[in-house]
Amino acid sequence: MNMWLKVPEWQVIHGFSTRKGGVSSSPFESLNLSGSDDDPANILLNRKIALEALGLELNQTAWLKQIHGADVLEAKPGVQTGDALVCKQPHLAIAVAAADCYPVLFHDPVNRVIGAAHCGWKGTLARLPEKVVVAMEQLGAKREHIKAAIGPGISVERYEVGEDLIAQFKAVNFSDNCFQNRNLNLRQCNLETLLHARIEEDNIWVSEWCTYDPLFFSHRRDKGLTGRMWAVISL
């Protein structure tokens, strides 16, 4: 398996990283791209290795101090605080981190606008992907041209939650397809949000990978002591 998973037929620089190909040692083995427990020097080198594999540079990358919210920011190089980025600047990469939460990438190839969102349960509940679509429109994107890709995340089979959280999702009208007893299907929730945002179904790609797989970092599987993947896109 390669360092990066990519969306078939997307003609834009992008990828969803795996945990393969980096320098970090266990339990962050090996391509850990974020977090506070690993050696910062390893994280920095991993970022350079991963981005160079896409033909990108770290000094032309925007990423986030993520707060499990629903703030969408216009990207600028370096770190910002929020959970989603939008961009129309050529040669500037944008990145979000995840390790069970769902990364979602966006691309309007006609109007040349991109976006990236980190959708944990809080961002998913707040319909963060739809907020990204609105922010992209403000930069000139058109919904009929926007393509979206939902990357690897925790599967419904592995994501049992409290009844109170299930009730919160039902209260904002997510469909019954989003629940299996006390298990929450964040992948389906984000797909429904994209469809609600009037993104064409044929323009949505959904990864079937679950981050419980050893190919990925998983916060739940590893009981919090784990690394992070990145989802990256650049014009």
Image: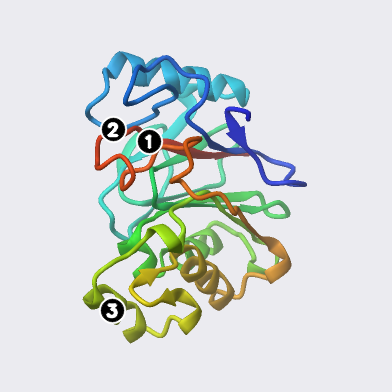
How far apart marks 3 and 1 lie (CA) works out to: 27 Å
| Circle nearer the N terminus (2, 3) | 2
| Residue shown at 37% from the left, 69% from the top | 183
In the image, 40 versus 60, the foreground residue is 40
The C terminus, quarter of image: top right
Q: Residues within 10 Å of mark 2 (few under 14, many from 20)?
A: some
How far apart marks 1 and 2 lie (CA) works out to: 7 Å
Indicate the position of residue 156 as horizontal and vertical percent values: 44, 63
| Residue shown at 46% from the left, 58% from the top | 155
- Give the numbered dot on residue 228: 1
The amino acid type of the residue labelled 1 equals Arg
The amino acid type of the residue labelled 3 equals Gln
- Label 2 SS: loop
Q: Is residue 126 visible?
A: no
Q: Is residue 192 visible?
A: yes
Q: Is residue 129 above or below residue 168?
A: above
- Label 1 SS: loop
The N terminus, quarter of image: top right
The amino acid type of the residue labelled 2 equals Gly
Labels 1 & 2 near each other (Cβ < 8 A): yes
| Circle nearer the N terminus (3, 1) | 3
- Give the numbered dot on residue 168: 3
- Give the numbered dot on residue 35: 2
